[in-house]
C-alpha cells in the first residue's frame, strides 16, 4: 500500500449546499492523522465519505488504493470504523455484538471465536462478554466499538470524535488504546474538536473550518510557520495575542515595552494557532 488515504478535490453538498469544499490530503501507512475543527466544519461528513457511508458530490477518494465509489467492497474490507453515534446493539450481549460483526465479515467460526476473545481482552471487556450492551458505561461501549472495528483485521481505522462525552479518566484509557494500536502499525484517522487529543495523539493535523482544509502539517510545522513565541496582553477581560518567530524574539519585544502591565510571554500551542487561523475558540 503506497498511500493509505488519498483525497483529491473532494466536494460534498446537501441539497445543493456545499459542506465539504475542495478537500485534498493524503495519509501514509502507519500515520496517525487528526482532523480538527469546530462543530459543523465537515469532519463527520468527510469521515462518512472516506468510509463509503455517503457518496462525495465531486472529486476522488482512494482508500488503500481502492476507489470509494467503484470499489466500495474492497474499501470496506480494509477499514475499521468507529462512529460518533454509538452503533453497537444495546439489546445484544457484548459477545453477540462481536459475533454478529464477525459473521457479516464471513470470518470462519474458530478464527472468529479466537479473534473475539483476543480483542475483548485487548479492550479489557472479557469479563463483560455475557453482559447486555445496555448495561455498559459509555467508555465500555466505545471500547466495544473499537474491538468490533478491529475484528476483520483492517489496515486503516477511522474514529469519529472517539472520546466525546467521556470522563477524563476514560478518555485517557482510550488514548492509550489508540496510541498502542498506532504503535502496532495501524494507520489511523480521527476527527475531534479537542485540542489536547490531537496534540497528544496525532503525527499530522488537518485543520478544517467551514468545509475547507485551512492548515495541514505537524504541530511543529504550524508553530514554525505562525511563530513559536507568543506575547499575551490582557485588555479588560480578554487577551490579545502577538506571535513571534521564537521565545527570544517575544522576550525582546516585551523588554522594549515601557509598560509591561498585563503582558505575558509563553511558547505558542495548537489552540493559539487555531484561534489565529479561525478567529474562534473551540468549546
Ligand atoms: P462536524 O463533524 O465537523 O461537526 P458535519 O460533517 O457533521 O460537521 O456537518 C457539516 C455540515 O453539514 C453542517 O452544517 C451540517 O448541518 C451539515 N450536514 C451534515 N449531515 C447532513 C445531512 N445528512 N443533511 C443535510 N445537512 C447535513
Image (tube, grey):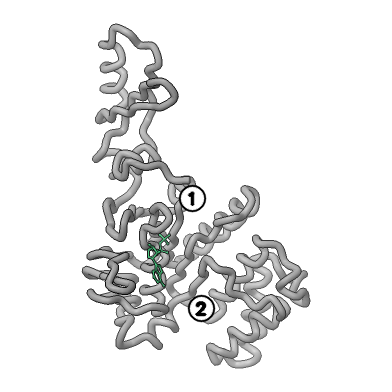
Q: Is 83 placed above or below 246 here?
A: below
Residue 153, numbered label: 2
- The x and y percentages for residue 216 are 28, 53
Select label 2 or label 1 by which is in front: 1
Q: Which mark is residue 115?
A: none
Q: Look at mark 1 in the image and give the residue it sits on.
A: 197
Label 2 crowd bin: few (<14), some (14–19), many (20+), radius 10 Å: some
Question: In the shown orientation, is residue 8 left or right of residue 19?
Answer: left
- Pick whichever, 60 or 189, lies toward us: 60
Q: In which quarter of the image is ligand 1?
A: bottom left
Q: Nearer the viewer, residue 199 or 187?
A: 199
Mark 1 surroundings: few (<14), some (14-19) or many (≥20) residues within 10 A:
many
Residue at 72%, 71% (x, y): give it: 134
Residue at the top extreme?
Answer: 258
Q: Nearer the viewer, residue 257 or 4?
A: 257
User: Which element is circle 2 on?
Assistant: loop
Q: Position of residue 207 (x, y in %)?
A: 33, 53
The image shows residue 283 at horizontal and vertical percentages of 48, 45
Residue at 55% across, 68% down: 85
Which quadrant would the N terminus be assigned to in this image? bottom left
In the displayed structure, 153 sits above or below 198; it is: below
**Residue 210 occupies quadrant:** bottom left
Q: Is residue 213 above or below residue 223?
A: below
**In terms of secondary structure, where does tag 1 sit?**
helix
* 89 shown above or below 121: below
Q: Which of marks 2 and 1 is nearer the N terminus?
A: 2
Name the residue rendered at 37%, 17% in the picture.
Answer: 263
Query: CA–CA distance between discs 2 and 1?
Result: 25 Å
- The picture places residue 41, in percent across and down from the top left corner, at 36, 58
Farthest front residue in view: 15
Amino acid at each position: 500500500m503506497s498511500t493509505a488515504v488519498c483525497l483529491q478535490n473532494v466536494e460534498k453538498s446537501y441539497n445543493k449546499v456545499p459542506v465539504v469544499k475542495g478537500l485534498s490530503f493524503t495519509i501514509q501507512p502507519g500515520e496517525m492523522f487528526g482532523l480538527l475543527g469546530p462543530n459543523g466544519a465537515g469532519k463527520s461528513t468527510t469521515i462518512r465519505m472516506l468510509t463509503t457511508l455517503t457518496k462525495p458530490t465531486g472529486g476522488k477518494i482512494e482508500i488503500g488504493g481502492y476507489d470509494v465509489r467503484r470499489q466500495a467492497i474492497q474499501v470496506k474490507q480494509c477499514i475499521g470504523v468507529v462512529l460518533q453515534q454509538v452503533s453497537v446493539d444495546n439489546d445484544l450481549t457484548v459477545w453477540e455484538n462481536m459475533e454478529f460483526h464477525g459473521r457479516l465479515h464471513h470470518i470462519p467460526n474458530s478464527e472468529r471465536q479466537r479473534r473475539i476473545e483476543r480483542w475483548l481482552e485487548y479492550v479489557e471487556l472479557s469479563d463483560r462478554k455475557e453482559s447486555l450492551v445496555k448495561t455498559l458505561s459509555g467508555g465500555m461501549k466505545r471500547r466495544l466499538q473499537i474491538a468490533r472495528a478491529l475484528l476483520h483485521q483492517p489496515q486503516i481505522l477511522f474514529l469519529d470524535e472517539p472520546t466525546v462525552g467521556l470522563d477524563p479518566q476514560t478518555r485517557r484509557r482510550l488514548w492509550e488504546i489508540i496510541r498502542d494500536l498506532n504503535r502496532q502499525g495501524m494507520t489511523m484517522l480521527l476527527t475531534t474538536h479537542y485540542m489536547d487529543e490531537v496534540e497528544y495523539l496525532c503525527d499530522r493535523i488537518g485543520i478544517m473550518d467551514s468545509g475547507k482544509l485551512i492548515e495541514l502539517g505537524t504541530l511543529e510545522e504550524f508553530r514554525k510557520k505562525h511563530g513559536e513565541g507568543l506575547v499575551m496582553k490582557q485588555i479588560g477581560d480578554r487577551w490579545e495575542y502577538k506571535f513571534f518567530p521564537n521565545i527570544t524574539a517575544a522576550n525582546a519585544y516585551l523588554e522594549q515595552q515601557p509598560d509591561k502591565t498585563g503582558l505575558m510571554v509563553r511558547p505558542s500551542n495548537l489552540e493559539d494557532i487555531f484561534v489565529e487561523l479561525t478567529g474562534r475558540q473551540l468549546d
